[in-house]
Amino acid sequence: MANRNKAKGTGWETAVADYLNEQLGQYRELWKDSDRSVRWKDPLDPDNIRRNVQEGTADIGDLQVRPFAGECKAEKSYDLAGYVRQAEAEAVNAGMPFGVAYVKRPRARTEDGYAVTSIRTHAAIVRALREAGY
């Protein structure tokens, strides 16, 4: 059972990373039709969204989505408060200003899942965007 749940979580992390990379222009055109090892436009670009390797006790989240630490959740029942708390703690560990939980929506496409933050984080994002001229 644990391996099946781990595979489900890994699949969700990969789906979110692939979707975000594609939407943000990090992947080459037609990347799905070729070898995954050549999917990047620039493999060294720090804006590439990658799954993090977990090391030690200070978890840094499942995905590096600069300026976010992303925590992916694919569970039957939701614990939004717990997910947000975990994402914000992992953002601190990763040195990122924002934490976000990517929550799988049952029987839905990846892009229809949820990106969940606290209102505190949302306000900080709005402030940063306004300071950048938006």
Image: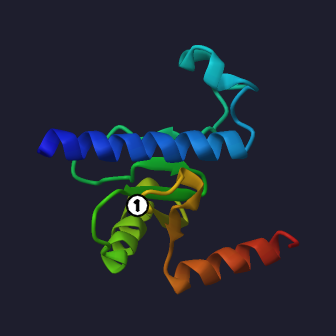
Point out residue 134 in the picture as x, y percentages from the top left corner: 86, 73
- The answer to whether residue 64 is visible is yes
Local SS, label 1: loop
Amino acid at dot 1 = Pro
In the picture, the quarter occupied by the N terminus is: top left
In screen coordinates, is 32 left or right of 4? right
In screen coordinates, is 45 left or right of 57?
Answer: right
Which of the 4 image quarters holds residue 87?
bottom left
From the viewer's perspective, is residue 50 above or below residue 115? above
Residue 121 location (% of width, % of height): 55, 78
Q: Is residue 96 above or below residue 54?
A: below
Q: Residue at x 42, y 45 (%)?
A: 13
Q: Is residue 4 left or right of residue 116?
A: left
**Residue found farthest to the right:** 133
Q: Is residue 65 left or right of residue 26?
A: left
Question: For residue 45, what is the image quadrant?
Answer: top right
For label 1, the residue is 106
Please give the name of the residue rendered at 53% of the width and 52% of the height, measured from the top-left corner. 110
Q: Position of residue 59 (x, y in %)?
A: 31, 53
In the current view of this chain or complex, which residue is farthest to the front?
107
Q: Looking at the image, which residue is at 38% across and 58% down? A: 93
